[in-house]
Amino acid sequence: MTATGAVRDADGTDAADGPEYIAERAAADGLEAIDKTKDGRDMTDTAAIARRLFTALQDADVPVIHELIAEDLVDHSPMFGRNAFERENLKESAVRFKTAFPDVRIHTEHVLADGDKVLVHEIVTGTNTGPFGEQPPTGRTMRVQAAHILRIVGGRVVEHWSVRELETMRAALGIGEDGAPHGG
């Protein structure tokens, strides 16, 4: 397994994470470029594609989410009764989440790639200043973790598995399992 990530924001602010560094790491690991971005940059490994996706989720960048999620993605980890990582659901959820948490940050703590699969350990932080589902803003901050496994083929995510701290998020926001506000 190749560790290609470190503690950093989803936007890849670590200086050693530019396209040249990624290309060097990919070449050192015997990987080939599997795709190019719309602006012509090589996406030399699955970890770079995963980072780009989580940056797009943080920023609610719908065109990039559309580009990186396969239309026929298989989501093995439904959330709230729906396949949250399917393309249209994910685009909608990213916009709603950014509206509810305008200051959302997705910190990709670990990005580990092995062949066509990538493990992403994320920590999501934000303050609930907009409506969240049916709930009015709480003004509360949250910090939750999730782990995702993405299978990437041809530069697109085709399968998704995850484990999320939904109870931690509900507790931080003062929202019960039934969606009703609770606690002070």
Image: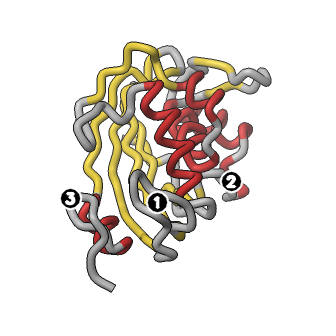
Amino acid type of the residue tagged 3 in the rendering: Asp
Residue highlighted by disc 1:
109
Marks 2 and 3: which is nearer the front? 3
Quadrant where the N terminus is found in the figure: top left
Number of numbered discs present? 3
Mark 2 or 1, nearer chain start: 2
Q: CA distance from mark 2 to mark 1?
A: 15 Å
Q: Residues within 10 Å of mark 1 (few under 14, many from 20)?
A: some
Q: Is residue 170 left or right of residue 121?
A: left
- Residues at badges 2 and 1 in contact (C-beta under 8 Å)? no
Mark 1 or 3, nearer chain start: 1
Marks 1 and 3: which is nearer the front? 3
Residue highlighted by disc 2:
16
- Residues at badges 2 and 3 in contact (C-beta under 8 Å)? no
Amino acid type of the residue tagged 2 in the rendering: Ala
Q: CA distance from mark 1 to mark 3?
A: 31 Å
Residue 82 falls in image quadrant: top left
Q: Residue at x 50, y 14 (%)?
A: 154
Q: Residue at x 38, y 13 (%)?
A: 72
Q: Nearer the viewer, residue 165 or 89?
A: 89
